[in-house]
Image (tube, rainbow, N blue to C red):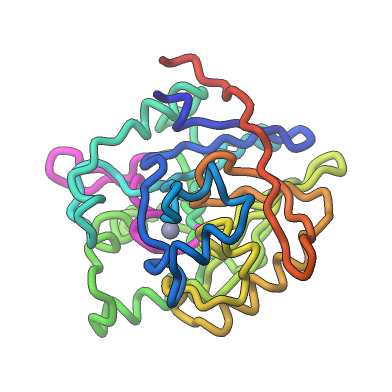
């Protein structure tokens, strides 16, 4: 089963792993795309059989990543977390294998150097902290946690004004980190090291970033929630209901797809189910996603 949860890629000298906490959740396309229908999805042939069900519903993963670069262990997004009360029933009281799956690729709570959150939604900050002796405590005590300055300030305004329907994840997974002095507030173009840097991709949230990886002439990008499903490569400007700023989100996706099309850049979709990574290709007047067959990850567990 962990084989479905853990995938791995190599980009130059950099190793990238995905750790999925929720695999292939099925939901209606209309949850993501304004006016989305099964027919809309079924008209795009390459979405089958991996990314949609035979009746045109979307499949998405909830996952985070580990990037091993320049001798550092960098976690990109920390999923939802176990035993939480979250805004949707499906994410409440989750039984999570996240920490075991990290261990299967040699990552322990103590050896993580950096935790980066692409943005501060509940499904990207979950394992920042865990409940220890009744107190929310940093899961990775030796890491620096990188929060976007702009993103953090945005959520602090929501927090003060009660401007979002559920802010429990800020109390549980963000504030304990800042209180412990483990957070660094970074700009949206921050460079983590020679091989890993951030790229501002606002729209979904104001301070949202994607993660660019470059090593020995090879390139990859972890999208974050710039997009949620490969259908958005075919329809980048279609209104995405998860975007806080719909116009900016659409413009960012279009620019991203145009820049990635027919280039040797490995696009790794934060909410894509397998094949999680692949290439953007022009496809008539639009684009398609050509998923890489998922290599059997470095995953010894059954
Ligand atoms: Zn998300």
Q: Is residue 262 left or right of residue 109?
A: right
Task: Evaluate whether residue 150 shows in this view.
Answer: no
The quadrant where residue 16 appears: top right
The quadrant where residue 227 appears: bottom right
Residue at x 24%, y 51% (from the top left corner)? 90
Residue at x 40%, y 32% (from the top left corner)? 109
Task: Evaluate whether residue 5 shows in this view.
Answer: yes
Residue 106 lies in the magenta stretch = no
The quadrant where residue 166 appears: bottom left
Residues rendered magenta in the picture: 118-139
Towards the viewer: 92 or 280: 280
Q: Is 89 rendered above or below residue 29? A: above
- Tell which residue pokes out farthest to the right in this image: 217
Residue at x 56%, y 84% (from the top left corner)? 247
Towards the viewer: 238 or 67: 238
Residue at x 46%, y 21% (from the top left corner)? 104
Towards the viewer: 180 or 292: 292
Q: Quadrant of the N terminus?
A: top left
Where is residue 268? Give x, y as percent: 62, 48
Q: Is 140 rendered above or below residue 295? A: below
Q: Is residue 39 left or right of residue 258?
A: left
- For ligand 1, give the image quadrant: bottom left
Q: Is 25 rendered above or below residue 190? A: above
Q: Is residue 63 left or right of residue 209?
A: left
Where is residue 212? Give x, y as percent: 69, 54
Where is residue 253? Give x, y as percent: 64, 70
Q: Is residue 275 left or right of residue 301?
A: right
Where is residue 265? Give x, y as percent: 77, 50
Question: Count the marks: how many?
Answer: 0
């Amino acid at each position: 089963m962990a084989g479905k949860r853990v995938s791995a890629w190599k980009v130059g000298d950099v190793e990238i792993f995905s750790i999925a906490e929720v695999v292939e959740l099925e939901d209606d396309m209309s949850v993501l795309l304004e006016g989305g229908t099964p027919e809309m999805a079924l008209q795009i042939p390459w979405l089958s059989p991996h990314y949609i069900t035979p009746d045109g519903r979307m499949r998405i993963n909830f996952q985070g990543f580990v990037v091993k670069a320049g001798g550092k262990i960098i976690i990109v997004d920390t999923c939802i977390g176990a035993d939480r009360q979250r805004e949707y029933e499906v994410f409440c009281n989750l039984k999570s294998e996240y920490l075991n799956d990290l261990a299967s690729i040699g990552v322990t709570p103590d050896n993580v150097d950096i935790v980066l959150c692409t943005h501060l939604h509940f499904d990207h900050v979950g394992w920042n902290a865990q409940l220890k002796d009744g107190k929310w405590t940093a899961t990775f005590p030796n890491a620096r946690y990188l929060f976007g300055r702009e993103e953090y300030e945005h959520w602090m305004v929501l927090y003060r004004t009660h401007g979002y329907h559920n802010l429990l994840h800020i109390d549980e997974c963000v504030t304990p980190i800042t209180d412990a002095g483990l957070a660094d507030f970074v700009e949206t173009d921050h460079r983590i090291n020679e091989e890993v840097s951030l790229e501002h991709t606002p729209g979904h949230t104001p301070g949202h970033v994607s993660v660019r990886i470059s090593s020995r002439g090879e390139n990859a990008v972890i999208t974050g929630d710039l997009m949620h499903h490969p259908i958005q490569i075919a329809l980048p400007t279609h209104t995405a209901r998860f975007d806080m700023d719909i116009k900016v989100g659409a413009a960012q996706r279009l620019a991203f797809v145009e820049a990635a099309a027919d280039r040797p850049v490995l696009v790794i979709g934060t909410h894509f189910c397998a094949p999680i990574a692949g290439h953007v290709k022009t496809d008539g007047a639009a684009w398609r996603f050509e998923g890489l067959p998922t290599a059997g990850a470095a995953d010894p567990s059954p």
